[in-house]
Amino acid sequence: MQVVVLAAGQGTRMRSALPKVLQPLAGRPMLAHVLETARTLGAAKICVVYGHGGEAVREALSAPDLAWAHQSPQLGTGHAVQQALPHLDDDRITLVLYGDVPRIGEATLRRLLAAAEGTRLGLLTVALDDPTGYGRIIRDAAGQVQRIVEHKDATEAERAVREVNTGILAAPTALLRDWLGRLSNDNAQGEYYLTDIIAMAVEAGVPVVATQPDTVVETLGVNNRRQLAELERSYQRDVADRLLEAGVTLADPARIDVRGTLSCERDVRIDVNCVFEGEVVLGEGVHIGAHCVIRNARIGAGTRIQPFSHIEDTTMGAACVIGPYARTRPGTELGEDVHLGNFVEVKNSRIADHSKANHLAYVGDADIGQRVNVGAGTITCNYDGANKFRTIIEDDVFIGSDTQLVAPVRVGRGATLGAGTTLTKDAPAEQLTVSRAKQLTIAGWKRPVKAPK
Ligand code: UD1
Ligand code: CA
């Protein structure tokens, strides 16, 4: 089996500089969803037909297993499939998919492919309450598919037919090649219609077998932002249903967005309006508070992420308490029972078990040991404007509030830094280090007063 993906349409109604098939659904280009499905089916070849301005499509999704066929000008769906023919093997079935029909499912396509086995033409059709605009499936008195008539070419009686062409079909390639070579554009739109091969198959005595999708949403195409938004919601609702079935508690299944993969162990609870991106793994009993954004993270069992936290490229151990309003940036590795409180930012740092930074701190390029207390307002000064340097804080250190650690610098095991210290040299283990101007009281000093007017 081989796949042709039509992706040459301009998508004018999206009103965007981005080609239509690159518009994201659940964080990935629509075309990437279709390619993933084609790969899951085990396609021996995948050829993408791309159009004018479509170089960006090629660049965005190029992969060694993809062939690309340029279609210019765009003379219709039949003409589009013709452009892919040089890449296709005659002895395989060709499946035609669409870059702007991103939710087509594997099970539906397996049924369609089975229908096309043994020199048949498989056609995916659906019955719609409002078939306006679609090609209609015309059957004979015995119920056999005879041909497809496009809406614009159809008579009043034909337009009353509710069974429509989804556009997705599977055909023996040698025959497809022959039929495409005989298409004409003598129709209402002056286009080479792929749909005209149905009547040719019937004429050649090739059985046409119509199959139906598991759900209509799989066959919906995207021509405008409203349709894209509707598919996004349906996608997210399906993700939410799968999470619920897997035992995850969602405060509101309509208010979660997963743009990637979210894997959850037992008894995970997720409050409203959380966004998960990339690959996220939540351990047993993890609780995610409302309004969190979590991208590429592994979160250990029992950890609580409190509301409005932002977690990116981070791993954290069990029983941590993060936020509210915490931010971990790429390269953050937290041990067990680490606490990060409000307005604490951590970047490219390791913080070991039982350490805490509970308020207003910046920890960048640091290695922090176990049982360290990072006081409020502490900042690692890791950047001199050109270079970044590391701060090392060993086990059992206590850092007083409002301390600046000017890297590179090391704080020895068990050391204490007095509040307000600007540390520019290493602090020895077990001792108090403090840099602070001596406190003065000026006796008899008077606050200036304004002169009377
Ligand atoms: C097509 C079908 C119609 C079906 C409908 C389902 C034909 C003639 N008609 O109609 O029976 O009900 O889809 O949505 O096939 N494309 C190209 N190059 C072209 C023309 C189209 O790549 O020259 C691509 C478009 O990007 C799009 C797809 O083919 O992804 C369908 O094209 P579109 O013009 O939307 O076809 P419809 O007229 O909607
Ligand atoms: Ca269309």
Image (cartoon, grey):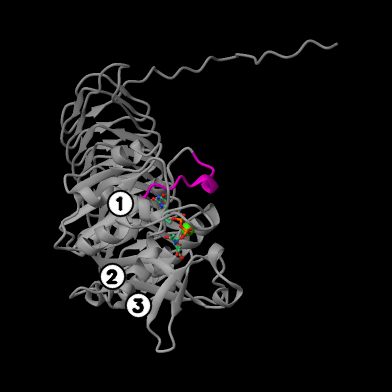
Q: Quadrant of residue 262?
A: bottom left
Mark drawn on residue 210: 3
| 306 with respect to 338 (left or right) | right
Quadrant occupied by the C terminus: top right
Q: Quadrant of residue 392?
A: top left
Residues drawn in magenta: 7-16
Marks 3/1: CA–CA distance:
23 Å
Q: Please state which of residues 453 and 351 is positioned toward the viewer in this rendering.
A: 351
Dot placed on the residue nearer the N-terminal end, 2 or 3: 2
Q: Which residue is mark 1?
A: 82
Dot placed on the residue nearer the N-terminal end, 3 or 1: 1
Marks 1/2: CA–CA distance:
22 Å
Q: Nearer the viewer, mark 2 or mark 3?
A: 3
Q: Amino acid at mark 2?
A: Leu
Q: Position of residue 233 (x, y in %)?
A: 47, 63
Local packing at callout 2 (Cα closer than 10 Å; few below 14, some 14-19, many 20+) is: many
> What residue lies at 41% left-to-right and 56% top-to-bottom?
184
Q: Position of residue 365 (x, y in %)?
A: 24, 31
* Ligand 1 is within 8 Å of the C-beta of the residue at disc 1: no
* Ligand 1 is within 8 Å of the C-beta of the residue at disc 2: no
Instruction: Classify mark 2: helix, strand or loop.
Output: helix
Q: Which residue is mark 2?
A: 109
Q: Is residue 248 visible?
A: no
> What residue lies at 15% left-to-right and 56% top-to-bottom?
89
Magenta segment includes 146:
no
Q: Amino acid at mark 3?
A: Ala
